[in-house]
Amino acid sequence: MFSVIITGTGSYIPDHVQTNDAFLSSVFYSERQEIINKSPLDIIDNLKKITGIEERRYAAPHLNTSDIAAIAAHNAINDCGADPESLDFIIVAHNFGNSPAGSFQSDMVPSVANRVKHLLHINNPSCVAFDVIFGCPGWVQGLIIAQAFCQSGMASKGVVIGAEILSRVSDAADRDSMIYADGAGACIVASKPITDTSTNGILSVAAKSFSAADVNYIYMDKGFAPTANNQDKYLKMKGRKVYEFAMQHVPQAMKECLDKAGVNIHSLKKIFIHQANEKMDEGIVKRFYELYNIDTPPSYIMPLSINKLGNSSVATVPTLYNLVIKNLLPNHQLQKNDIILFASVGAGMNINAVCYRY
C-alpha cells in the first residue's frame, strides 16, 4: 500500500498589482444592462466589506495560462530537486485554456498540460499530460486524480498545477470583475510505501457534483454594458445562489472527508479553502465546526490570501499552500504531522476536499 505525499511546491504570482482604487473611474451595469446608480467608491467599499479584497494580481500581456503554469511547475520541481524526466504525469487544472490578451477566443488545443510539458522541455513520452476542467475546485480534483494514479500503480510521481488568467474573461462593466485575479500554483506528488500509522500524505478525499439543479450558478454570458457585443462571452455568476449553495454543501463535504480519515476535529491544524470570498469562507468554516457542535473555529485554522491576491480560481488553494509552506504568510506555519484540509467549491456546481497529513 502506498501513501501519496507532496514533495515540493511552487507558484507564480504576477507582478502587476491592481488595487481597488483602479476601479474608481469604472462604470458598472446590472445584468439588465442598466447603470448602477451608486458611486464607484461605494461599490468598491461594499466589495471589500464582503470579499475582503483590497488588491489583486494581473498577468502581463505577453504571458498566457500555459506560461504561468509552467513557471509554477518549474518552481515546484526545483523545490524538491525532482528530475523533470522522471515525472509520470502533468495535470493542469484550469477553465479557460490560453486566452491571449485582447482576444475573446479561448485556445484549448493543444491542451495546457501538453504546452506545459513542452515549455518544461520534458522529452519522456511516458509522462502523460492532460487537463482538468472542474471549476474552481480543479486543482484539488487534480490532487485526487493524482492519488488514484499513484495508488493504482500507474504512476509514482507527477505534478499537479492550477493556473488561471481570469482578468481576460471578466466583464469590466460587471462589478464582479473586481473579484477576479490571475495566478498559478503547483505541487509535486509522489507515492511512498506506508510503513507505520503516522506516515504522512493524503488520508482521505471527497468530491461531489451538484449539476442537476445548480449547474448554472456560474456561467458564461454577454457583457452588461449596453454597447456590449452579444457574441463576446464573459464569466458571470449568481452571487447569492453561489453563497447559499456553498453554505449548505461545502461544510458537509469537508466533514465527510475528515470523518473518512478518522481524524478528530481538534487535531485539525489548517484549512486551505478556495479564496472566493472572505465572508463566505468564514461562514463555511464556521458551519463546518458547528457540525461538530463547536460554535467558534480556532483563530489559527484558516489562512487567507484573497485580500492581496483576489480570486484566481484553481490557483488559490495551491498558491495559498505554497505561501504557508514558504513562511510567507504571517502567523501561519505548519509542523511535521500536522493534519490539514484542502477544500473548494465552484462552477458545475462542484465541491471537493482532501485530508492530508503534512
Image (spheres, helix red, strand yellow):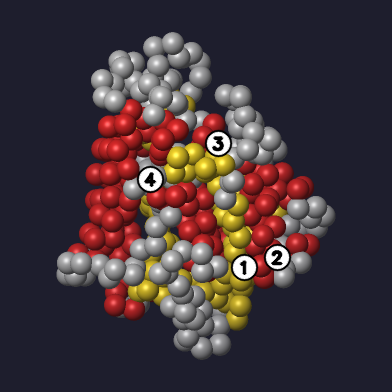
Q: Are marks 2 and 1 in contact (CB under 8 Å)?
A: yes
The residue positioned 34% from the left and 16% from the top of the image is: 33
Q: Residues within 10 Å of mark 1 (few under 14, many from 20)?
A: many
The residue positioned 51% from the left and 31% from the top of the image is: 169
Residue annotated with mark 1: 8
Mark pair 2, 1: CA separation: 8 Å
Residue annotated with mark 2: 78
The residue positioned 39% from the left and 45% from the top of the image is: 54
| Numbered disc 4: secondary structure | loop
At which x and y percent is residue 70? Answer: 68, 50
At which x and y percent is residue 149? Answer: 60, 63
Mark pair 4, 3: CA separation: 23 Å
Q: Residues within 10 Å of mark 4 (few under 14, many from 20)?
A: many
Q: What amino acid type should be assigned to the residue bearing mark 4?
A: Ile
Between circles 3 and 2, the one closer to the viewer is 2
N-terminal of the pair, mark 2 or mark 1, is 1
Residue annotated with mark 4: 53
| Numbered disc 2: secondary structure | helix
Number of disc labels = 4
Q: What amino acid type should be assigned to the residue bearing mark 2?
A: Asn
N-terminal of the pair, mark 4 or mark 1, is 1
Between circles 1 and 3, the one closer to the viewer is 1
Mark pair 2, 4: CA separation: 31 Å
Task: Tell me, yes or no, if residue 151 can be seen here.
Answer: no
N-terminal of the pair, mark 3 or mark 2, is 2
Question: Image height check: is 231 above or below 305?
Answer: above
Between circles 4 and 1, the one closer to the viewer is 4
Residue annotated with mark 3: 96
